[in-house]
Image (cartoon, rainbow, N blue to C red):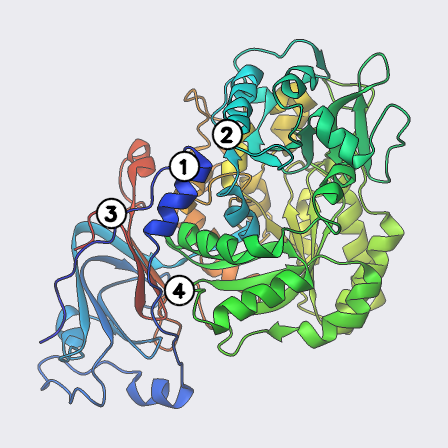
Amino acid sequence: MPRRTRVSAPALPARNSLPARASQLAREAIAWPAGIAGACALILAVGCAAPEGSAPPAADETAADLVLLGGTIVTLEEGAPQVEALAAKDGRIVALGTRAEVESRIGDATEVIELAPGELAIPGFIEGHGHFMGIGDSAIQLDLRGAESWQAIVDQVAAAVADTPPGQWIRGRGWHQEKWQTAPEPAVEGFPVHDSLSAISPDHPVLLTHASGHAVFVNAKALELGGVDASTADPPGGEILHQPDGAPSGLLRETAAGLVQRARSADGTPPPEEVERMISLAAQEVLSHGITSFHDAGSSFEVVDALAAAADAGGLRVRLWMMIRASNDELRARLPSYKGARDADGWVRVGGIKLSIDGALGSRGAWMLEPYSDATHTAGLNLVPIEEARETADIAIETGTQLCIHAIGDRANREVLDIFEDAFKAYPDKRDLRWRVEHAQHLHLDEIPRFAKLGVIASMQGVHCTSDGPWVPDRIGDQRAEEGAYVWRKLADSGALIVNGTDAPVESVSAIASFDASIGRRMKGGERFYPDQRMEREEALRTYTINAAQSVFEEAEKGSLAVGKLADVAVLSQNILTVEEPAIADTTVRYTIVGGEVVYRGDGAR
């Protein structure tokens, strides 16, 4: 008999105390199923559904491994945008159609999932820009995203100090000074100074990463270990914020963070014993949100090796497309041997090079054409010299690798588009390169049409708009915000391809939250951030599926539900394409299916 009854796995806990959460996740770890094998000959042999009324096929020939029935199944394919049922075998979709057609694929070993009325099956979400290891790392440090004041963060650190042996590092992530209910006192440029933090942690180095990931706040012990004092010069592309008397305040912008991070480990990478745990926790978190593929926005060759080893050991059930972050010399020496799949079954694929031209708006590191409205002495930071970036562009074209450049400010976006355009002119025989601007958050009106004209992809994050919206006009003024901040509608109408994501762990890796933000642009208080730039619902879903696949040359394999494509599916508790807009945020993931295997079961899974 087919398998129709199953017991739900425990849902992943809400993010609260990170060390406790990591421990709970480890106890409730999902047992990842065995790997898949996708054979093209088999796809051709079984690619068509049996006609209605035909006899059930022999179980050992065409019986499916998995069948979905009922609910609503949206394919995003023009010829059949909605079907009643889906069948998968050996990791691929082998049938789509009516219930009667697909039921003929059910055999004794077939797992059958009967969707409840109102539930929605869609192509698995593709996270278009995130930091996979960062998600795992954030699960083993203090979660500061809920803090409403600087004192609340000091109190969190004090509690950690009481449970941590002297000398060990205490780390946290997610604080954002613009989201505190009260301003810190004393302060420099709205950021606190380290005195109160240092007072409760004299024997523990403390490193607290800003929500954007583009600044850190440290205590006196960490400054001492990093050799940072009043006489320390700013490194290229970074800034040490000083108090009026010249002493470091504790805030280190951009590359200046490395001065202290290197005191924790020589090359700034996590200690080896943490890597395996980070991979496991990241995979669980990603899959719990219905994400089946993930574009990793910048990792080292060594991290790629670690992820490939995890995939070969069967410990990775999400497909990773990797951008390499390395020096130009290292890229020339190593990238050619890393291009393509790094593991036996293609779970980890290297396809991009990552650069960061500027920083983030929250820490005033985004590179702007004009000074900040609330800090007129600065227009942000250029992190990578333009000539160095041009050299990277040459390497990308010569190696057939996509170039993906982080650009948030309007000056940064202009410079990046100039780099891309000049490279395209220098190599006119190279076409359909699909280079990407990562974030493209703040654009001058002149740059908006250039994306489509050049064939450059705008890799944006819907949830950044609603998270940042309350304070963006303060940073850059109402006019610049209205004309060029998170202008999805203007970009889409100009013909640009838009990819969605979360930039996790900057934000939660929730695809549903970013989808909701993309169509509603509702901020925490309910006000909409320039709502004329909203996406339509199917348009937003495409940015999270087929657009994301197309952005990395994978549209033939994933991004929609079609016979022959990978059987990567997310099943949601309700239809996000039709429910009332305020209810979208209540949507949960029932199942995440990768290669025809259920790798996550949420609350309500039957």
Q: Do the CB atoms of the residues marked 2 and 3 lie less than 8 Å apart?
A: no
Q: Earlier in the sequence, mark 1 or mark 4?
A: 1
Q: CA distance from mark 2 to mark 4?
A: 34 Å
Tell me where residue 556 appears, x and y as whole percent.
Answer: 48, 73
Q: Nearer the viewer, residue 173 or 97?
A: 173
Q: Do the CB atoms of the residues marked 1 and 2 lie less than 8 Å apart?
A: yes
Q: Earlier in the sequence, mark 2 or mark 4?
A: 2
Reading the image, the residue beneath label 1 is 15
Tell me where residue 41 appears, x and y as whole percent.
Answer: 39, 90
Residue 275 figure quarter: bottom right
Vertical comparison of 309 with 120: above or below: below
Disc 4 versus disc 3: nearer the observer: 3
Tell me where residue 376 appears, x and y as whole percent.
Answer: 80, 18
Looking at numbered disc 1 in the image, what kind of residue is underneath it?
Arg
Reading the image, the residue beneath label 4 is 560
Reading the image, the residue beneath label 2 is 145
Q: Residue at x 53, y 53 (%)?
A: 128
Q: Is residue 547 left or right of residue 70?
A: right
Q: Earlier in the sequence, mark 4 or mark 3?
A: 4
Q: Earlier in the sequence, mark 2 or mark 3?
A: 2
Q: Residue at x 23, y 47 (%)?
A: 603
Reading the image, the residue beneath label 3 is 573
Looking at numbered disc 3 in the image, what kind of residue is underneath it?
Ser
Neighbor class of circle 2 (other Cα within 10 Å; few <14, some 14-19, many 20+) is many
- Dot 1: what SS? loop
Q: CA distance from mark 1 to mark 4?
A: 31 Å
